[in-house]
Amino acid sequence: MKNFTTLKDISNLSELIKEAILLKMNPFEYSEIGKHKTLVMLFFNSSLRTRLSTEKAAKNLGMDVMILNVNDAWNLEFEDGTIMNFDKSEHIKEAAQVISQYADVIAVRAFPTLTDKAKDEGEVILNSFKKYATVPIVNMESATAHPLQALADAITISELTEKKTPKVVLSWAPHPKALPQAVANSFVKMMQDLDVDFTITHPKGYELNSKITKNSPINYNQEDALKDADFVYVKNWSSYNDYGKVLNQDNNWMMTKAKLGNAKFMHCLPVRRNIVVEDAVLDSDQSVVIKQANNRTFAAQVVLKQILEDL
Ligand SMILES: CCC[C@H](NC(=O)CCC(=O)O)C(=O)O
Ligand SMILES: NC(=O)OP(=O)(O)O
C-alpha cells in the first residue's frame, strides 16, 4: 500500500479486515517492522480517537511518532503562485518536503471549510501533501472522507454480525453545529463494498453527494428505514446541496431506544448525548461505540503495516 487517503487504496477489503482482526489478537506480532521508522501526524483540527489510536497503532509496529498541531506552527499557503505578503508564512511546497525528511509516513487531519465547496471537493490540503511530500500519506479525516473510521466500522460489523447479510442503516441525527459529510461519505462507500443490506435515512435536503450514494436506497421516513435493522449507524452531517448549511435540528430524528429495536448502535464518536442519541441507548448493551473506537487502533495498524511493508 502506497498511500491510504481513500477507500480506493484498499486492494482487498475482506483480507484487510481479517488481517486487522489477527493484529487485534496479537498486536505486537510485527513490532519490528516499524523499527527506526517515524510517523509524523499533522492535525489541522481536533481529535481524540484518531490521534491516540493511530499513535498506538504505530507504536505497536515499533514506529517512533511525532505529532504537530499545525496551527501551532506557521500558517500555510496552499495556492500556487500566491504573492505571500499577507498572513501565510510558509508554502506547502516547502513544508511538505521538509516534513518528509523527518518522516517515513505522514498522516494528516484537515476538516472541510464547509463554505468553499470547490476547495473541499478538491481535497486541497490532503492532495497538496500527496503532491509535495516524498513519503506515503495517510488520511486521518479530510474534507470529504474518513477512511480509517470506515475501516474500523467495517471491522466492527464483520466481528459482531450474527447474519451473513445484516441490515445496516445510516441515520442522520440533529446537531447544533454544521458538521462535515466525511464520516457519512466513507461509511456509505464502505457499506457499498460489504455484503450488507444498506439503507440511508435523513430529512429532505440532507442528500449526500449522489456520486457517492449512487443507488444506495434513501428513505426519508426514519422509522420505516429502521425496521428490522441489525446495525444502526447514527451521524450528523450538514447539507451537501445547500453546502455546509444546518437546515434542520428536528429532535424527532434523535436516536432512541424505541426506534432502535434490537439493533446494535454505532457512532464514530464524539457524540452529543441527548441531541444525537438519548442516554438510554448509549448506556445500553446495544451500543457498540466503545468496541468500535477500540477497532480504530487495528484499522490504523493494518494500514500502517501494509505501508511499511511497501516502503
Ligand atoms: C470523527 C468526527 C469528527 C467530526 N465531529 C465533530 O466535529 C463533532 C464536534 C462537536 O460535536 O462539537 C465530524 O463530524 O466529522
Ligand atoms: N471518530 C474519530 O475520528 O474521533 P476523533 O475526532 O476523536 O479522532
Image: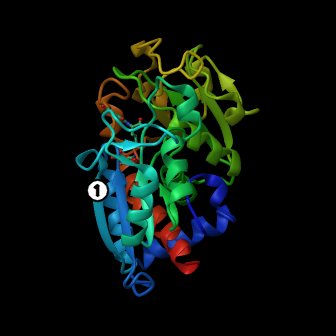
Placement of the N terminus among the 4 image quadrants: bottom right
Residue occupied by mark 1: 68
Quadrant position of ligand 1: top left
Image coordinates of residue 175 in percent, x first then y, are 37, 23
Q: What sort of colour scheme is used for the picture?
A: rainbow
Query: Foreground: 38 or 26?
Result: 38
Give coordinates of residue 177: x percent, y percent.
35, 22
Residue at the left extreme of this rendering: 72
In the image, what residue occupies the spot 36% across and 71% down?
102
**x, y percent for residue 223:** 56, 21
161 left or right of 142? right
Camera-side residue: 63 or 297? 63
Residue at 49% in and 59% down: 138
Measured as percent of width and height from the top left, residue 74 is found at: 28, 47
Q: Which residue is drawn at 56% across and 21% down?
A: 202
Q: What element carries label 1?
A: strand
Whether residue 99 is situated above or below residue 86 in the rendered picture? below
Relative placement, left or right, of 160 versus 224 is: left
Res 216 seen here: no
Image quadrant where residue 8 sits:
bottom right
Report whether residue 297 is seen.
yes
In the depicted structure, whether residue 85 falls above or below residue 202? below
Tally of marks: 1
Given residues 31 and 252, the one toward you in this image is: 31
Q: In which quarter of the image is residue 286?
A: top left
User: Can you tell which quarter of the image residue 56 is in?
Assistant: bottom left
Residue displayed at 51% across by 69% down: 302
Quadrant (top left/top right/bottom left/bottom right) for the C terminus: bottom right
The three-letter code of the residue at mark 1 reads Leu
